[in-house]
Amino acid sequence: MTTPELSRRERKKEDTRRRIFEAAIELFRAKGFEATTVDEITEKADVGRGTFFNYFPKKESVLAWLSEEKLVAAEQNLHELLSAPGTAREKLIELYATAAAVYEQDLDLARYVFGEWLKRGFAPTQDVERRWQKITLDLIQQGRSNGELREDVEPLRAETILSSVYIAAIFQFLFAPAECGLPMTSLRDEITARFSIVFDGLTPRTEVRA
């Protein structure tokens, strides 16, 4: 199969996935997530029931699509990211900041999807959460091995802290930027700033005297 043919097939698959996603979100907004059936989604998207499950294993997976787009790219580039020059700190900040960019593209859509995630415990799906966690833990472990990150902090605890900061930044950006008291004009910049504080700590730096 030639590259153009493969590209056309991939574009068609992506178009179908997006059509299902958009039909589902429209129904979720109109009827509610729980009240919407897969059959209603497939009818609105004009696809077969089997086609739906080829792209989304279950209804909840539709809500994970925004995150999964970034996740797939991150998984494909993980080896390159681990071997690239730069500190683990820089790589972790870039990973989270890039993932957050999707929430700035369509604020109404992002608010709806993120709001549904909140009802389900913050994670789009357990599979997506697990895969994101693995990428983060690999980078944290690299930082520990290189002596960049503290070895007395469990990697899973470090990942939990970073994810908590990430989720809080997205929530405030989408739902309460004014109440935050900060000029959150860019979610990427805000996450970079918050992660920098996490890595630096809040304690004053001790001056070294000669």
Image: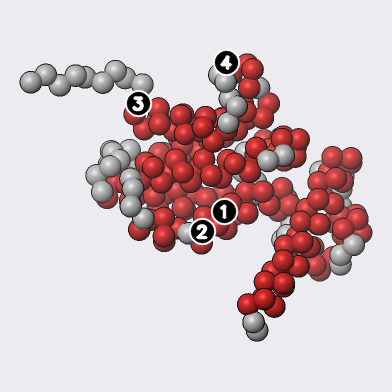
Tell us which disc is closer to us: 4 or 3.
4
Question: Quick check: can you spot residue 140?
Answer: no
Q: Which residue is mark 1?
A: 71
At label 1, the amino acid type is Leu
Q: Which residue is mark 4?
A: 181
At label 3, counting other C-alpha atoms closer than 10 Å, the crowd grade (few under 14, some 14-19, many 20 or more) is few
Which SS class for mark 4?
A: loop
Asked if marks 2 and 4 touch (Cβ < 8 Å), the reply is no
At label 3, the amino acid type is Gly
| Direction from residue 126 to residue 32 in the image, left or right | right
Q: Which residue is mark 2?
A: 75
Please say if 59 is above or below 160. Answer: below
Question: Residue 42 falls in which quadrant of the image?
Answer: bottom right
Give me the residue at 29% from left, 46% from top: 144
Which SS class for mark 3?
A: loop
At label 2, counting other C-alpha atoms closer than 10 Å, the crowd grade (few under 14, some 14-19, many 20 or more) is some
Q: Which x, y percent locates residue 37? A: 87, 52
Residue 179 tag number: none
| Direction from residue 6 to residue 147 in the image, left or right | left
Dot 4 or dot 3: first in sequence order is 4
Q: Nearer the viewer, residue 187 or 110?
A: 187
